[in-house]
Image (cartoon, rainbow, N blue to C red):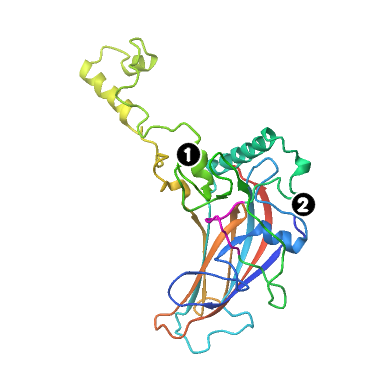
Amino acid sequence: MKFPSQRKLLYYDDSISNDTLGLISSGGTGSGAICLPKDLSIVNRRGYASTTRKGVPLVYRVKVDLYSQALDATGPSAAVGSDFQTTLKIDGCQNNWVMRNAAVKMHAARENQFKLGGIKKSQRGAYSHEIRYGYDAHNQTWLTPIDGDGNAFTGGTWDLTTLSTHDDDDVKITLCGAATTEESSLSVTQVNLPFAYLSSRANMNADTNLENSVTPTKYSIINSMLTPGEVLFSTRDQLVEEARDAQDDVPYDVFAVDDVNNDITEPMELCRIVSGLGSSLHSSAIIDVPFGIMSMKASHFDAADTNTTHGIMVALEVLDIYEMEG
């Protein structure tokens, strides 16, 4: 994929409220979610994607600039306290081996489905060779970048990838949020990518060294190392018990297909930027965005709650695009 020549994007919200972090809405559209592949496709007039053509997730390294002012460069309409601050919070999906493997396996499954259905690549849409994911909803809406005059770009059509199964024929794939237990009796509109992946794998028990597991052999090498000489039997038992029980529980939540609230479905905070009178009305950070998809929330605050509802601008500059390692 060609690195974008136009790699700067601008978003705004003219009515950020005080105290509570709220999803921003750029150009009057969207619910805080940004899809960098979509927006880069608009301004570069070529297709960008969240994955390679083999399904490997792409991570977008982005410089984020937060400006505590409205689109017309104005600030609050009334005096604010000296502790006035603007906070921008950005979330995204997790960046780990589960997400990487899940995307590759989902891609392979989709390609195999087309193959079994006798669908040739020439019969598919020009931009259907990579999966288009939603952030956390099957009816995902996205923020729209603005041009130099402050008008939202028109753009084209960015339709999420649809899956067809034995029971459902309009299923979208999301990276975060709600998951649904995969049963034939359920009719679903969306499937959570990492949840679907882990549901397709054999699961590790919470305790991998259960009491009813296979008994060690009499002449075990490990047992011989535990008892190199004439050691009292009670001491040997303590050593064996310690060896079996210590640090044996998996250090992450044990995935369960009947529990849709697994850790893997939760978003991660990619960054939190704060600007204000006490520091600067401009702050920045560099973040890595898995799949190039993220969600932004913002708020204004001062202790006196003095008319702090006004605008912000967020500028994004893509610095790099690389494959997720996991």
**Within the image, what quadrant is residue 48 found in?**
bottom right
At x 61%, y 37%, the residue is: 109
> Along the horizontal axis of the image, is 228 left or right of 36?
left
Number of other residues with Cα within 10 Å of mark 2, as a class: few under 14, some 14 to 19, many 20 or more:
few
Where disc 1 sits, the SS reads loop
Camera-nearest residue between 34 and 123: 123
Number of other residues with Cα within 10 Å of mark 1, as a class: few under 14, some 14 to 19, many 20 or more:
few
Question: Mark 1 belongs to which amino acid?
Answer: Ser
Camera-nearest residue between 24 and 67: 24
Check the image and report above or below for 243 versus 101.
above
Question: Mark 2 belongs to which amino acid?
Answer: Lys
State how many labels appear.
Answer: 2
- Quarter of the figure with the C terminus: top right
- Checking the image for residue 220, the label placed there is none
Q: Main secondary structure of the magenta part?
A: loop
Residue 248 pos. (x, y %): 36, 32
At x 65%, y 59%, the residue is: 36
Check the image and report above or below for 87 versus 172.
below
Task: Check residue 149 for magenta coloring.
Answer: no
Range of residues picked out in magenta: 133-142
At x 66%, y 68%, the residue is: 145
Residue 91 pos. (x, y %): 52, 59
Give the residue at mark 1.
184
Give the residue at mark 2.
2
Check the image and report above or below for 180 versus 319.
above
Give the mark toward the camera: 2 or 1. 1
